[in-house]
């Protein structure tokens, strides 16, 4: 009888832990969606918990603070954007010109909620606490490393290329004249393709 009771209690504990993990996942996923759509400051704990069918008080059973949630949700938003980019590229190593063609495309410009979260949220994160900045810093550094690999490891040129791409995408989304926005994207794409060619010549 004791063994049966222990088994029942263990089953209840396992179910409770699984339910808690599922609730936590829902909270992070919804917060990441809100962040991508409306920015970091759009996330209200009360509204967020209500949107996933949970109580406000239950929030602290999952996270120590709103700041801790934002850091995890930002990590998810950035990871989701990177996963989509890899899926669209077909995987594998690409040239800088290929990266720029995809990143500085009309489709990416118009995909505010599903595109690169660095371009969408850099300004927000720059005003956020250290935890959020460290999350994005890691993703920015990874982007720079990816680009540097296409340029013989030239870290400074890679920094310039990433800055140009992120900045151009952000500005292209601001410009309401679509023709001018397209021109901005094309100009930066062409410049980066030329920069890659120069780097290749220097290595030859």
Image (cartoon, rainbow, N blue to C red):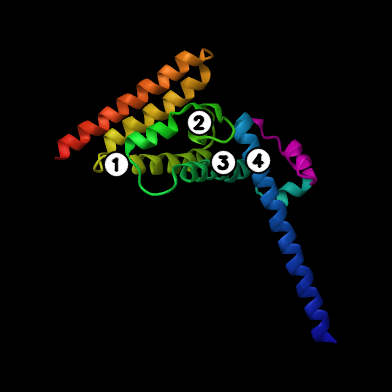
Q: Are marks 3 and 4 in contact (CB under 8 Å)?
A: no
Residue 63 position, x and y percent, is 66, 49
Residue at 50% x, 31% y is 108
Residue occupied by mark 4 = 31
Name the residue beneath numbered marker 3: 77
Identify the disc placed on residue 150. 1
The residue under the point 34% across, 40% down is: 147
**Residue neighbourhood size for the residue with mark 2, other residues' Cα within 10 Å, grouped as few (<14), some (14–19), many (≥20):** some
Q: How far apart are the alpha carbons under marks 2 and 4? A: 22 Å
- Circle nearer the viewer, 3 or 2: 2
SS at mark 1 in the image: loop
**Label 1 close to label 3 by CB (< 8 Å):** no
- Specify the segment rendered in magenta: 42-56
**Residue identified by numbered label 2:** 108
Q: Which corner quadrant holds the C terminus?
A: top left
Q: CA distance from mark 1 to mark 4?
A: 34 Å
| 150 lies above or below 61 | above
Q: First in sequence: mark 1 or mark 2?
A: 2
What x and y, as percent, mark residue 196?
26, 33
């Amino acid at each position: 009888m004791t063994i049966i009771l222990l088994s029942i209690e263990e089953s209840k504990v396992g179910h409770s832990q699984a339910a808690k993990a599922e609730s936590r996942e829902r909270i992070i996923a919804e917060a990441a969606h809100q962040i991508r759509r409306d920015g970091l400051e759009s996330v209200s704990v009360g509204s967020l918990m209500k949107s996933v069918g949970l109580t406000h008080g239950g929030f602290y059973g999952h996270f120590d603070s709103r700041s801790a949630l934002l850091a995890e949700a930002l990590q998810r938003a950035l990871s989701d954007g990177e996963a989509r980019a890899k899926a669209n590229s077909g995987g594998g190593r690409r040239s800088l010109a290929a990266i720029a063609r995809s990143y500085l495309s009309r489709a990416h410009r118009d995909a505010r909620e599903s595109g690169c979260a660095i371009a969408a949220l850099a300004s927000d994160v720059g005003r956020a606490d250290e935890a959020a900045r460290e999350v994005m810093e890691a993703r920015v550094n990874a982007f720079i490393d990816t680009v540097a690999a296409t340029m013989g490891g030239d870290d400074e040129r890679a920094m310039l290329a990433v800055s140009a791409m992120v900045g151009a995408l952000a500005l292209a989304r601001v410009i309401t004249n679509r023709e001018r926005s397209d021109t901005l994207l094309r100009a930066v794409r062409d410049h980066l393709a030329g920069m890659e060619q120069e780097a290749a010549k220097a290595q030859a």
